[in-house]
Image (tube, rainbow, N blue to C red):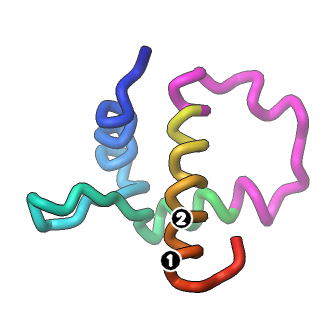
Amino acid sequence: MVSKSGMLDRLVARGVAARTSDPDDHRVHATPRGASVVWRMVVARPFRGDLHMGLRMEDLHAFEQGFRAVSEQMAAMGERA
């Protein structure tokens, strides 16, 4: 099983996510590059049912976690997810 921390470390290393600078605050947010990647995957391209077939399970879990975080942030900001 892949840890969330390990997945987040990889997303940060790839420049698509960033951790807060406060060591007591463990939140992670998408960088402009990360937001662009998500936009291109979800909005700019029609959904393909076979798209996920070439992805590793840990990458799919990271993607799911990212969408969950965005949804929670939108809810916290009073926006509809």
Residue 76 is labelled as 1
Q: Residue at x 59, y 22 (%)?
A: 57
Is 16 located above or below residue 5 in the figure?
A: below
Question: Which residues are the magenta region?
Answer: 40-60
Query: Residue 16 occupies which quadrant of the picture?
Result: bottom left
Q: Are marks 1 and 2 in contact (CB under 8 Å)?
A: yes
- Of residues 80 and 35, the one drawn nearer to the viewer in this rendering: 80
Residue 43 sits inside the magenta stretch: yes
Disc 2 residue type? Glu
Label 1 Cα crowd, 10 Å radius (few <14 / some 14-19 / many 20+): few
Q: Residue at x 39, y 45 (%)?
A: 11
Q: Tell me if 29 is positioned left or right of 77 in this view.
A: left
Q: Where residue 52 sits: x, y (%)?
A: 75, 30
Residue furthest to the left in view is: 23
Q: Where residue 39 sits: x, y (%)?
A: 67, 65
Instruction: Tell me the CA gap for discs 1 and 2.
Output: 6 Å
Residue 61 sits inside the magenta stretch: no
Q: Tell me if 50 is positioned left or right of 60 in this view.
A: right
Is 74 located above or below residue 10 in the figure?
A: below
Number of numbered markers: 2
Disc 1 residue type? Ala
Q: Residue at x 90, y 54 (%)?
A: 46
Q: Residue at x 44, y 63 (%)?
A: 30
- Quadrant (top left, top right, bottom left, bottom right) of the N terminus: top left
Q: Tell me if 69 is positioned left or right of 64 in this view.
A: left
Residue furthest to the top in view is: 1
Say which residue label 2 marks.
72
- Which structural element holds mark 2? helix
